[in-house]
Image: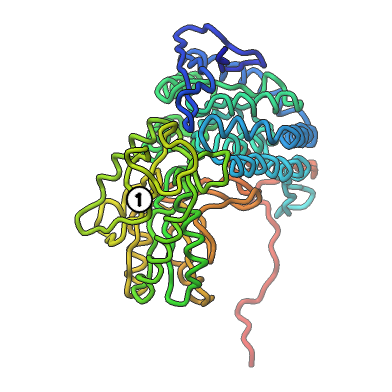
Amino acid sequence: MTRTVASIIGGQPRHGTAGARRRALPNPARTGQVTSEAELAGAGVFLEACRAAQAARRAWAATPAPVRGRAIQQAGRLVESNAEALARIVTDEIGKPYAESLGEVQEVVDTCSFFLGEGRRLYGQTVPSEMPDKQLFTFRVPVGVAAVVTAGNFPVAVPSWYLVPALVCGNPVVWKPAEYAPASAEALTRLFLHAGVPADVLHLVVADGPTAFEGLELALAAGLVDKVGFTGSSDVGRRIGALTGRHLQSPCLELGGKNPLVVMPDADLDLAVEGALFSGFGTAGQRCTSLGTVVVHESVHDDFLARFTAATEAAAIGDPYADVLYGPMLNHRFLERFLGWLDLVEGHHRVSGSTGVGRITRANPRAGFVGDPDAGLYCHPTIVDGVTATDKLARTETFGPIVGVASFADDDGAMELADGHGYGLSASIYTNDPATAFRFRERIGAGMVSVNNSTSGAEAHLPFGGNRRSGNGARQSGVWVLDQFTRWQAMNWDYSGGLQKAQMDVADVDADLDYRLG
């Protein structure tokens, strides 16, 4: 019998709600198998969840921060002890290679481990006053109810970047995961609830995007949401930014990218190829930090391209439970979009990397494919050489296994290709010259820069986020995310026994400003 995944409000699944619709979710690696059936809720359920979270706001904020941190510590332990089961759910639901799914689960554990300490380190400051017998203080206070909407390519790791700091900081959370990855979300939610996070503090809403947006509009209008976090496309991010702006709120937006990898003449080409292969084709190119364009100096272009093509042709692709570079597309929607992006390949481009282009089937085979190509939603890796700065392919985020290759003659040409597309999430440069690396960091608009490493890869204690079309400057992970889920509150305490007025009742010092050295 197919398992049904529904919203969880107050710790209880909500079946049969008004406007609910059921959607069967096939395994993208074996589309004949249904992993689960999602019960997609209506906008009223999202509003109900926000109302329940708002009712729990004061009690959760009053819970001592170290106690909130203890719940997060226990969540990390539970996730770690259920790592293999959770990773299997992720792999079955979105087709991510099992080894990658285990790594994603470890990211949740690392995030919990880091923020356990923040439960005891939500530091404020004491500030000297300009008047006697007066003390000044600052405090971090919770923002309020956080509504979090996440994508499904990292169905547990990225949500943890929101849920964990929001909860530690004292904010109830309403979480809307991707509608094609509800089983992973339900599993993570239940682990958090069993870890001691109160049932009225964390709510899961299983809904599609338009319905969630409608529910968010209603909740903001009713004053039930105080902070919005969103990971997804730049277009939807703009809509959320406009909506929250009407309510004088600043959302936390983590959006798309067209991430460059620059290869300088002195680069270790084998290392650069390894980085390009992983960041371009890992997770089938379905990461926000996936490599968009390799920008290669003309003196090493041909050598790099030959090595990159050979490595891509040799890479294992297929069954996500085998030792493969990548498995299937996340679902049919992403497959269809990817096939459409192949239309960006123009006549002056040269294609390599596989024995075919488009969807991998028995009729359009991939040499060395692992498993049954007709069973799932698999696509050929595609390298497109000859990309120029004016090509649509150089400026469009392509969420799938396609990587452009462009050449440059000087630093200005490299920067036009690396930065002219308007995104600003991640960027990488391969060089052995420190001066080159630091100059690149100064000029690139990306929020994250790697040297001799891929464009993909995050650690729980570094800030994650982008600029321009990739985000609004908000950061996740590390201590920097605390500014998303807390607000600074200032307090002054005057114990002089009288009213001392700032800027007016301030002592001065005697000075002879006409004095000059002889």
Residue 446 at x, y = what percent?
46, 56
**Observer-nearest of 461 and 293:** 293
On the image, the x and y values in percent for residue 390 come to 24, 58
- Check disc 1 and give the amino acid type: Thr
How many callouts does the rendering have?
Answer: 1
Specify how the rendered protein is coloured: rainbow
**Residue 472 visible in the shown view:** no
Could one spot residue 283 in this view of the protein?
yes
Mark 1 neighbour density, 10 Å: few (under 14) some (14–19) many (20 or more):
some
Residue 27: x, y in percent? 50, 28
Question: Taking 76 as reference, is 256 above or below it?
Answer: below
Q: Quadrant of residue 169?
A: top right
Percent coordinates x, y for residue 140 in the rendering: 68, 40
Is residue 433 positioned above or below 133 on the image?
below
Rendered-image quadrant of the C terminus: bottom right
In the displayed structure, does residue 132 sit left or right of residue 271?
Answer: right
The residue that disc 1 covers is 355
Residue for point 35% across, 50% down: 355
Vertical arrangement, residue 442 with respect to residue 49, above or below = below
40 left or right of 504?
Answer: left
The vertical placement of 85 against 269, above or below, is above
Task: Pick whichever, 127 or 292, lies toward us.
Answer: 292
* Residue closer to the observer: 326 or 240: 326
Is label 1 in a helix, a strand or a loop?
A: loop
Tell which residue pokes out farthest to the bottom in this image: 518
